[in-house]
């Protein structure tokens, strides 16, 4: 993924936006932290219809050195994956902060129909040199984000988007799931102050713009992931400016009810920063409690789109 430089009005907006959003974002998180556990347990999605498909996003907190030492072992996290598949009927997963060897092992243990696509994070130094982030623990591989599905994944691609000039590069990974008639895009957005050279720059607006632009190319797309951002609600939330207007209009979020964009908390600190969006009809949404991460899985059921004729696809899963 190439590093794109900013100039002019964009750079000015970043400097202004960074200062203006800091207090509002902290206030928005604090205002949600008092919710009770009962509000996130979920009542289950109920019985699925034959034409439904269930998608989940989950930040596994599998990179131990990123304050994840006390969020469960790889065995605990694999058990949570199995529970999502068995209890919620999930067939496609968008995963963040996963270790490459944990992912490969999980896919193997789940069965031969399960396939994955992995994209590593990268640390970029002031000279522009990229280096991988290794997971703590013997034989766990690199840290990254991934797609995991109970069928072939094809046409995998990394969507170009702006990233910090110096610091951690996350990203957007898309692929098709032909057996489900879906295209899915997993996004892990940059944290505020993630550019070590320009800590006052905010990249999330451009990254969200790239994500929804990718969604607009195919009406069967489901996008989601860890956006490191609260929903655009509340007068004190001055970070609402990062959200493109089509996010909650052209598309609908898993937990969106009517015009409400609040949603249930997906992080153990009481904030919502994990999302699933689609233009397909939604038939269910659930936030699943877990002790295997500081994020709770978000599970959405949608109506599978009608099949369309298409050229044969070449699998790019690995």
Image (tube, helix red, strand yellow):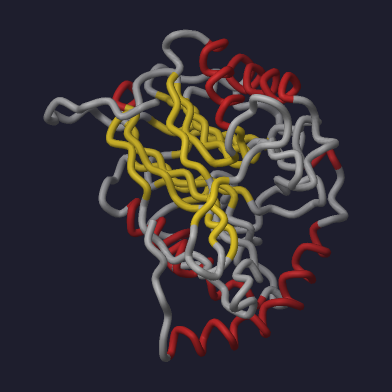
**In percent of the image, x 50 and y 68: which residue is there?**
127
Q: Where does residue 101 sit, x and y in percent of width and height?
A: 58, 25
- Report the quarter where the C terminus lies: top left
- Give the number of callouts: 0
Residue 292, relative to residue 191: is it above or below?
above
Q: Where does residue 46 sit, x and y in percent of width and height?
A: 60, 22
Query: In the drawing, does residue 290 fall left or right of residue 131?
Result: right
**In percent of the image, x 45 and y 17: which residue is there?**
114
Q: Where does residue 230 sit, x and y in percent of width and height?
A: 66, 61
| Relative depth, front residue between 303 and 289 | 289
**In percent of the image, x 57 and y 73: which residue is there?**
202
Query: In the drawing, does residue 266 fall left or right of residue 113?
Result: right
Residue 208, relative to residue 82: is it above or below?
below
- Report the quarter where the N terminus lies: bottom left
| Relative depth, front residue between 18 and 99 | 99
Within the image, what quadrant is residue 76 found in? top right
Q: Where does residue 55 sit, x and y in percent of width and height?
A: 50, 32
Query: In the drawing, does residue 207 fall left or right of residue 296?
Result: left
Within the image, what quadrant is residue 311 found in? top left
């Amino acid at each position: 993924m190439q590093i794109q430089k900013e100039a002019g009005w964009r750079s000015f907006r970043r400097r202004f936006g960074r200062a203006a959003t800091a207090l509002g974002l902290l206030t928005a998180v604090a205002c949600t932290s008092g919710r009770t556990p009962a509000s996130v347990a979920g009542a289950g999605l109920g019985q699925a219809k034959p034409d439904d498909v269930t998608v989940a996003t989950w930040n596994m907190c599998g990179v131990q050195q990123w304050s994840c030492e006390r969020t469960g072992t790889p065995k605990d996290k694999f058990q949570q994956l199995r529970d999502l598949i068995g209890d919620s009927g999930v067939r496609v997963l968008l995963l963040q902060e996963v270790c490459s060897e944990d992912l490969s092992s999980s896919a193997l243990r789940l069965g031969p129909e399960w396939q994955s696509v992995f994209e590593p994070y990268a640390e970029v130094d002031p000279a522009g040199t990229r280096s991988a982030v290794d997971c703590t623990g013997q034989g766990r591989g690199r840290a990254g984000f991934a797609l995991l599905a109970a069928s072939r994944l094809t046409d995998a691609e990394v969507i170009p988007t702006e990233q910090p000039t110096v610091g951690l590069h996350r990203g957007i990974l898309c692929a098709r799931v032909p057996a489900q008639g879906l295209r899915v895009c997993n996004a892990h957005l940059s944290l505020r102050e993630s550019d070590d050279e320009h800590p006052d720059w905010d990249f999330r607006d451009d990254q969200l713009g790239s994500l929804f632009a990718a969604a607009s190319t195919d009406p069967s797309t489901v996008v989601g992931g860890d956006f490191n951002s609260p929903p655009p609600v509340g007068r004190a939330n001055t970070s609402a400016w990062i959200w493109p207007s089509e996010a909650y209009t052209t598309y609908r979020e898993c937990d969106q009810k009517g015009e409400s964009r609040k949603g249930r908390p997906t992080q153990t600190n009481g904030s919502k920063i994990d999302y699933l969006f689609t233009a397909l009809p939604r038939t269910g949404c659930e936030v699943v409690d877990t002790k295997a991460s500081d994020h709770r899985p978000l599970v959405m059921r949608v109506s599978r789109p009608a099949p369309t004729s298409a050229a044969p696809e070449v699998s790019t899963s690995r």
